[in-house]
Image: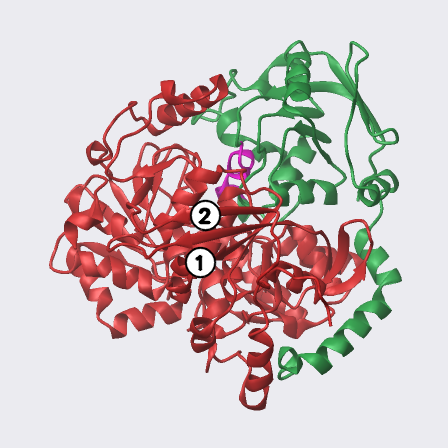
Chain colours: A green, B red
Amino acid sequence: MQAFRRLTARAAPLPDANLDTDIIFPARFLLHTSKTGLGPYAFHDRRFRPDGSQNPDFVLNQAPYRDAKILICGDNFGCGSSREQAPWALLDLGVRCLISTGFGEIFAANCFKNGMLALVVSADQREAMMQDAAAALPIEIDLYQTTIRRRNGALIPFAMEPWRREALLNGWDEIAIVLNQDRVRIDEFEKRQRAQQPWLYQGE
Amino acid sequence: MSTTPQTLYDKLWVSHLVRDYGDGTALLYIDRQLVHEVSSPQAFEALRTTGRSVRRPAAHLAVADHAVPTKDRDQPIKDPLARDQVALLSRNTAAFGIRCFDLSDPLQGIVHVIGPELGFTQPGMTLVCGDSHTSTHGAFGALAFGIGASECEAVLATQTLRQTRARTMKVSLNGRLPRGVSAKDAILALIGRLGSAGALGYAIEYAGEGVRLMSMEARMTLCNMSIEAGARMGLIAPDETTFAYLDGRPMAPRAAFWPPALAYWRTLVSDPDASFDRTEVMDIGALAPQTSWGTSPDQTAPVNACTPHPDAARSEAGRRKIEAALRYMDLAPGQPFSEVTIDTVFIGSCTNGRIEDLRAAAGILKDRRIAPTVTALAVPGSGQVKRQAEAEGLDQVFLDAGFEWRAAGCSLCVAMNNDRLAPGARCASTSNRNFEGRQGSGVRTHIMSPLTAAASAIAGHIADPRDYL
């Protein structure tokens, strides 16, 4: 994965609750089988009008937010479908960090796999950053310190499982790590399971 | 002997530990993966670029369901992107030695319908799929959850996933579902109560008399929509209903494998004194049929009621949510559902595309005609369901009522294929998500049971199925 260490950038406010992965990446574009170049489809039906022109009301079409790398999101962002096209499309737009009070669990896992942060903070903290975003103030994310620094200097610590933090800081390929470290453990598990639950290996 | 009482989730978790990292996460062995055309191309591509192989090809089963057309199936797929995507699944699975049902295969169908009907899904397993409705398979007492494409790749390459242990929630459904009310209504009512993020981070175990009385089809409907309350997993302890369903299925344990499997499956219950992180009780004995009115599955109400007033919200944010949903849905506050006219009806999906669902809808449609203003689709969840329905004459009931009778696929549940609706359409749908644009850009979706959808098709507006029994 792509490493994440520090990021200082302007954030875009997306206050609506339950912005599901169908809104982030409408299903009809799932016919594309590539994981790159999906940015044009991100929030497609909100970013563009039916005639294909940009909708000036949508925040990512407004001058200060066109290249926002951070999104301050409403509750339960990324709920719904497991489609990894949602984080892939956001990543293609340049988004590296999302902040909310909670995320769809599969969406958050998918973000992590792509070196993107989905940070959970309190409702008050999110509200403060929503206001910073509305004022187009930059926000500073430091994964070494696991803190968010607002423009006014206020520090907001965030929780992150140590193994995820380490993987993100180093940009590790998790599959390679498992293949390198755990191959024997997996072999042993299968041997034991095959003895105890042989029906799971029926015909193999 | 262990003395700490365990929940069913605990047992499934512990029995799949390859490595416990001691920080609340573990490397879990994944017994089975269902693979489809949308979430797998990038995973196979990554295997190629990294030179990795599939560790255990026999543990995976592939089928195209999301992008497939549901009519003219003897013709090549018209949409070139869909055609390429479906062909790519066949090529990828052939290259890596994974069994795949192509479109002409009689066993083709929606991943979450074919897994159970083939006996691929079994109690005690870990099972994943690049689809959030993988929670369906928890109805068998399997630890089943949706994953993204990167995780699909990890499972193909290593047969494992690093996971965070979930909190546990027990939901007891007390009472017996009244006539005209189904598992779909129970889960919609529960989601309405918990909220769309109310079960985030939990594995839900459904228990109680209401669940014990349910068929496997109904249990699958229940577990299927756990994700709409935020829970990645729904579980039901396997029992005689489960075992009877599995007995004789083509991929279920055969001959000498059956008795030890059965003996093991009987241990897959939460111990009597096991403690859950959260417990909920819902009485379903007097439940009314439900319909969604908004753009999130928790925006649901009894079908004989009205849309809510934004003033009824307890917070400003709540008020804005109701207002935004009513605006998108083009509904007024306090509007009776019986005044909400619909132009499309969809009966199908991994939530309600099984034989019992078709039987239930056909029971209402028999000797009746759908409203002339309505276009209605019946889309069986699998080729097997379709043939079973045809053997019972249900196809003719749907056709006589004015429905179209289609081939198996996800169809209007995700609207990736050519079944997509036009902007402004309003659909009574047995699917699982009423999200904005879910059935096509600007389309308004009301999710409900097959009974309620059938009654609504006849009435031309949202209707109470109890008036048609």
- Horizontally, residue B310 falls left or right of residue B395, namely right
Is residue A28 within the magenta segment? yes
Category of crowding for the residue at label 1, using alpha-carbon neighbours closer than 10 angstroms: few (below 14), some (14–19), many (at least 20) = some
Identify the residue shown where x is 43% and y is 27%: A50
Identity of the amino acid at label 2?
Val
Q: In this view of the protein, which residue sits in the foreground, A36 or B219?
A: B219
- Horizontally, residue B139 falls left or right of residue A170, namely left
Which residue lies under the disc numbered 1?
A: B208
Identify the residue shown where x is 81% and y is 49%: B23
- Horizontally, residue B193 falls left or right of residue B422, namely right
Category of crowding for the residue at label 2, using alpha-carbon neighbours closer than 10 angstroms: few (below 14), some (14–19), many (at least 20) = some
Residue A37 visible in the shown view = no
Secondary structure mostly taken by the magenta-highlighted segment of the chain: helix
Please give the chain letter of the residue carrying mark 2. Answer: B
Magenta stretch? Answer: A19-29
Of callouts 2 and 1, the N-terminal one: 1
Measuring from the top left, give residue A38's x and y in whole percent. 62, 38
Q: Measure the alpha-carbon separation of dots 2 and 1.
A: 9 Å
Q: For residue B357, which quarter of the picture?
A: bottom left
Which label was assigned to residue A110? none
Identity of the amino acid at label 1?
Gly
- Is the residue A91 above or below the residue B129 in the image? above
- Horizontally, residue B375 falls left or right of residue A191, namely left
Measuring from the top left, give residue A115's x and y in whole percent. 77, 39
Q: In this view of the protein, which residue sits in the foreground, B201 or B35?
A: B201
Residue B155 visible in the shown view = yes
